[in-house]
Image: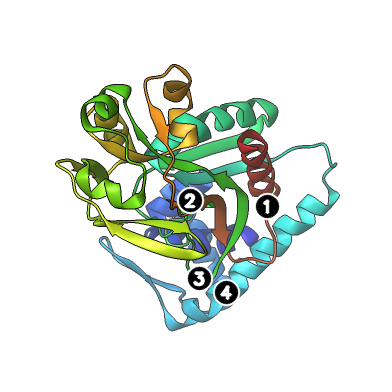
C-alpha cells in the first residue's frame, strides 16, 4: 500500500484540510490531492469528502484512519531499527510549550538540538493555551502542570521548583509574610481567574484565598509587575534565577506551608512507537533541566 497516500490521509484528518496536510508533509497541495486520489483508487472507496471550504472523513475513511496511523508508525519504527545508534534524529519535529518557558528554556535547547541533528527541522508553537496535540499534529508538548488522565503518553522530565517572590522594596514597605495566613494582608499577583493558592504542610493541603490589584494571563506579565515592586508572585526557579542571584527578587519561605509541587512533562500522542526525534529531544531537555 502507498505510504505516501496514507501520510496525506492522516495529516489531512489532523489538519482539517489538504493544504494543511501539504504544509506538514512539505509537498504542494496538488501533490497531496493526487496522492489521496491514488490511495482512494487503490482502496476502491472514497476516504474523504472535500469541498472548496471543508474536508471530512467518510465512514470508510474513519475506518481506515487507525490502520493508516499504525502502518506509518510501523514504517517509522522499521526505519529507526536499522539506523545507526549515533545517527541522531531526522524529520520535522513539531513542538509546543508555554510562552515564558518556551522562550527561556525550550528555544535554547532547540538551538543546540538543531546543531547536533542536521537532518531535523523544528516547528515550535509558543502559547499559554492548552493545545490539542492530536488535532494539530503536534509531536511533543512541554507542559508544567498536574496532568489529568488522558489518552496521551507523558514522561516526567524534571521537577519544577516554585516559590513566592517579592522585591526587597516591597517587603520593606509591606513586611515579609511569615505564615500562609499572612498572605491575606498582601498584594498577591495571580494568573487570570485564580482565586486561591495551594500549599502543603503537616501532611495536608491548604487553599488560601488571595487578592491583588493585578492579574495576567501570562507568567511573564506577573514576573514584570513583581519586579516593579507591586506585589508577591508565584514564580518558577528557571524564570527568576538571574533576578534572585542579583538580589532583585527575594524568594519567601513560610513557616507552615510550601507551594504545591509541579513537574515538567513531555507529552506526546499515544503510540506504540516514539520517534527518535521526540525521544532525543526529551532527553536533551531533561539534561538541561537537571
- Residue linked to disc 3: 150
Q: Are marks 3 and 1 in contact (CB under 8 Å)?
A: no
At 32% from the left edge and 23% from the top edge, which residue is drawn? 168
**Residue 75 to residue 89: above or below:** below
Q: Quadrant of the N terminus?
A: bottom right
Q: CA distance from mark 4 to mark 1?
A: 18 Å
How many C-alpha atoms fall within 10 Å of the one at disc 4: few (<14), some, or many (≥20)?
Answer: few
Dot 3 or dot 2, earlier in sequence? 2
Q: CA distance from mark 4 to mark 3?
A: 18 Å
**Nearest to viewer (mark 2 / mark 4):** 2
How was the colour assigned to the protein in this rendering?
rainbow
How many C-alpha atoms fall within 10 Å of the one at disc 2: few (<14), some, or many (≥20)?
Answer: many
Task: Please identify the quarter of the rendering in which residue 121 is found.
Answer: top right
- Residue linked to disc 2: 143
Locate residue 70 relative to residue 138 in the image: left or right.
right
**Nearest to viewer (mark 2 / mark 1):** 2
Circle 4 — which element? helix
Circle 3 — which element? loop
Q: Are marks 4 and 3 in contact (CB under 8 Å)?
A: no
- Residue linked to disc 4: 66
Dot 3 or dot 1, earlier in sequence? 3
Q: Are marks 4 and 1 in contact (CB under 8 Å)?
A: no
Q: CA distance from mark 3 to mark 2?
A: 14 Å
Amino acid at each position: 500500500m502507498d505510504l505516501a497516500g496514507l501520510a496525506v490521509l492522516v495529516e489531512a484528518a489532523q489538519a482539517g484540510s489538504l493544504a494543511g496536510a501539504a504544509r506538514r508533509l512539505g509537498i504542494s497541495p496538488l501533490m497531496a490531492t493526487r496522492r489521496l486520489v491514488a490511495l482512494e483508487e487503490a482502496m476502491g472507496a472514497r476516504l474523504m469528502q472535500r469541498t472548496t471550504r471543508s474536508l471530512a472523513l467518510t465512514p470508510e475513511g474513519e475506518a481506515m484512519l487507525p490502520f493508516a496511523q499504525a502502518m506509518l508508525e510501523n514504517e517509522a519504527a522499521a526505519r529507526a531499527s536499522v539506523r545507526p545508534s549515533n545517527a541522531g534524529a531526522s524529520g520535522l519535529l513539531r513542538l509546543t510549550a508555554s510562552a515564558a518557558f518556551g522562550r527561556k528554556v525550550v528555544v535554547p535547547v532547540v538551538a543546540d538540538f538543531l546543531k547536533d541533528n542536521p537532518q531535523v527541522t523544528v516547528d515550535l508553537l509558543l502559547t499559554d493555551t492548552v493545545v490539542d496535540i492530536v488535532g494539530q499534529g503536534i509531536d511533543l508538548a512541554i507542559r508544567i502542570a498536574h496532568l489529568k488522565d488522558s489518552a496521551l503518553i507523558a514522561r516526567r522530565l524534571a521537577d519544577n521548583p516554585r516559590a513566592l517572590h517579592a522585591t526587597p522594596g516591597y517587603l520593606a514597605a509591606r513586611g515579609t509574610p511569615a505564615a500562609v495566613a499572612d498572605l491575606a494582608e498582601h498584594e498577591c499577583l495571580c494568573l487570570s481567574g485564580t482565586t486561591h493558592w495551594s500549599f502543603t504542610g503537616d501532611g495536608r493541603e491548604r487553599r488560601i484565598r488571595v487578592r491583588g490589584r493585578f492579574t495576567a494571563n501570562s507568567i511573564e506579565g506577573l514576573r514584570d509587575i513583581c519586579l516593579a515592586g507591586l506585589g508577591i508572585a508565584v514564580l518558577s526557579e528557571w524564570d527568576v534565577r538571574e533576578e534572585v542571584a542579583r538580589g532583585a527578587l527575594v524568594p519567601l519561605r513560610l513557616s507552615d506551608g510550601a507551594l504545591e509541587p509541579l513537574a515538567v512533562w513531555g507529552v506526546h500522542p499515544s503510540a506504540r512507537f516514539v520517534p527518535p526525534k521526540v525521544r532525543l529531544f526529551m532527553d536533551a531537555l531533561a539534561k538541561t533541566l537537571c
